[in-house]
């Protein structure tokens, strides 16, 4: 699993007008090719009367699935620019459709490339971009004597608490950025004089607004 990747936060839609032609950009997250093609089909059905419904998507941890369609526009002037815009933004698991209603003025090859790139950028901006950062789920179990110190450390350290269970002991699950779990375990061990029961579990991605990524990196 890679340490982190970017994708769209969800559905996005935005319209722009270029030389009287309407370009409506749609973006959505898709984790499989089936999801991406279903989204494209949905937009095509919605805009069955459009001049073109051009599209592209990038799927997979290593961008292993990439597809694009000019949908009747001159070859390389629509699908490829959409795909390149997705890739330039470093996005994975993302599908974009740019619908065009022709306004009567021909744009030429260069104009089409710029227009479909702009339509894609508008859709991505409308959808919003998030980072998925790899974390390790760490369970810390202590008796109530130590819980105050542990709770204070979790709060002051800004750690992501996934779950807390109060029984005869306190058990808390914390999501720690991958690579930092050893230091966290050591800190918890020192804090409780070795009385904490600590277990590292599975790795999973935590979704973080893209604006917060830079802040976390600066803090490190």
Image: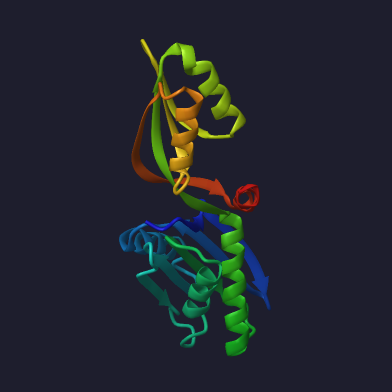
Rendering coords of residue 3 (x, y %): 45, 55
Q: Is residue 190 above or below residue 175?
A: above
Q: Nearer the viewer, residue 149 or 134?
A: 149
Rendering coords of residue 181 (x, y %): 44, 41
Residue in view at x 48 percent, y 40 percent:
183
Residue in view at x 43 percent, y 27 percent:
163
Rendering coords of residue 51 (x, y %): 50, 75
Residue in view at x 63 percent, y 84 percent:
111
Residue in view at x 35 percent, y 70 percent:
64
Q: Nearer the viewer, residue 117 or 6?
A: 6
Q: Is residue 106 visible?
A: no
Q: Nearer the viewer, residue 184 or 8?
A: 184
Q: Is residue 12 above or below residue 51?
A: above
Q: Is residue 110 above or below residue 122?
A: below
Q: Is residue 194 visible?
A: yes
Q: How many marks?
A: 0
Question: As drawn, is 127 to the left or to the right of 180?
Answer: right
Which part of the image, by quadrant, shows the N terminus? bottom left
Rendering coords of residue 15 (x, y %): 62, 63
């Amino acid at each position: 699993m890679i340490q982190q990747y970017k994708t769209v936060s969800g559905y996005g839609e935005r319209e722009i007008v270029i030389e009287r032609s309407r370009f409506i950009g749609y973006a959505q997250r898709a984790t499989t090719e089936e999801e991406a093609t279903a989204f494209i089909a949905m937009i095509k059905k919605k805009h069955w009367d459009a001049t073109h419904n051009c599209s592209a998507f990038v799927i997979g941890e290593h961008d292993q699935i990439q597809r694009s369609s000019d949908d009747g526009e001159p070859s390389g002037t629509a699908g490829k620019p959409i795909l390149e815009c997705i890739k330039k933004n470093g996005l994975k698991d993302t599908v974009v459709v740019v619908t065009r209603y022709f306004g009567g003025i021909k744009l030429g090859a260069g104009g089409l490339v710029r227009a479909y790139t702009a339509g894609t950028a508008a859709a991505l901006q409308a959808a919003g971009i998030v980072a998925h950062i790899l974390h390790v789920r760490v369970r810390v179990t202590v008796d109530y004597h130590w819980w105050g110190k542990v709770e204070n450390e979790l709060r002051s350290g800004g750690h992501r608490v996934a779950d807390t269970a109060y029984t005869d002991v306190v058990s808390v699950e914390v999501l720690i950025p991958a690579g930092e779990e050893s230091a966290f375990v050591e800190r918890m061990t020192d804090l409780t004089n070795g009385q904490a029961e600590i277990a590292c579990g599975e790795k999973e991605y935590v979704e973080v607004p893209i604006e917060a990524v830079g802040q976390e990196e600066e803090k490190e």
